Image (tube, grey):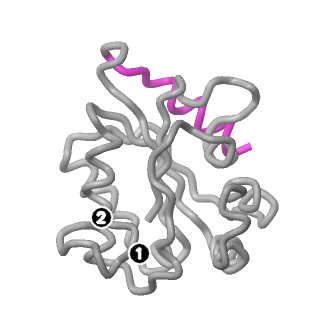
Amino acid sequence: MICLVLTIFANLFPAACTGAHERTFLAVKPDGVQRRLVGEIVRRFERKGFKLVALKLVQASEELLREHYAELRERPFYGRLVKYMASGPVVAMVWQGLDVVRASRALIGATNPADAQPGTIRGDFCIEESHSRQRLGGECPPRDRALVPRRGAPVLGGQCRALAV
C-alpha cells in the first residue's frame, strides 16, 4: 500500500525536463526516527536544492522487510537487520533532483560509520555499525519496489536508486 501511495505522490510532480532529474528512495531507520533526526536529514537534502516528492511514516512488517532485503538473506546480519527495521517506524522518502543519486551518497556518507566523514549524515549521527548496513545504488530491484511503488507500474520511471540511513 505504501508503494502505491508513494508512486502516486512522486508522479504528481514530474521532473521539469525529461532526463534532467532523477529520483532516489531514502529511508530513515527506526533509531533515526526515535532520535528525532528526520528534520535534520530533510534540511540537509533541501539545502542541496533537492525536492522531496514523497514522504511516509511506515511501520514495516517483517514480511515486507524480508522481501526488501532478499538479496542479503545469506549475510550473517540479515535476521538482526529485519528485526531491527521492524522494531519501530521508518520514514520513507523519495527525493528528486539533478544528480540526486550521487549527491545523496555524498550527503549520507560511507556505509560503515567508522569510515564516514564528519559532515555526512552517517558521520554525524550513526552510533552503531550493525544498524547502518545499507546497499547503495543499483536500479530499483524488487526489494526497493516493496517500499516505494508497486502495482505493476514502473518504479519512478525506472530511475530509482535506494539509499538508507
Tell me if 39 is positioned left or right of 60 in this view.
left
> For this view, does 22 lie left or right of residue 144?
left
Q: Nearer the viewer, residue 47 or 83?
A: 83
The image position of residue 144, as x and y in percent, is: 61, 46
Q: Could you tell me the amino acid type at mark 2?
A: Gly
Residue name at image x 41 percent, y 75 percent = 36
Q: Residue at x 45, y 53 (%)?
A: 136
Q: Earlier in the sequence, mark 2 or mark 1?
A: 1
| Residue 5 magenta | yes
Distance between the Cα atoms at labels 2 and 1?
A: 19 Å
Residue 88 horizontal side relative to residue 156, left or right: right
Camera-nearest label, 2 or 1 = 2
Amino acid at dot 1: Arg
Give the residue at mark 2: 109
SS at badge 1 = loop
x and y percent of residue 105 in the render?
32, 53
Query: Split into 4 quadrants, where in the image is the N terminus?
Result: top right
Quickly name the residue at label 1: 36
| Point 26% across, 46% down: residue | 103
The magenta-colored residue range is 1-16
**To which quarter of the image does residue 74 belong?**
bottom right
The residue nearer to you, when weighing 53 against 124, is: 124
Examine the image and state in which quarter residue 41 appears: bottom left
Which residue is at 43% across, 65% downward?
Answer: 165
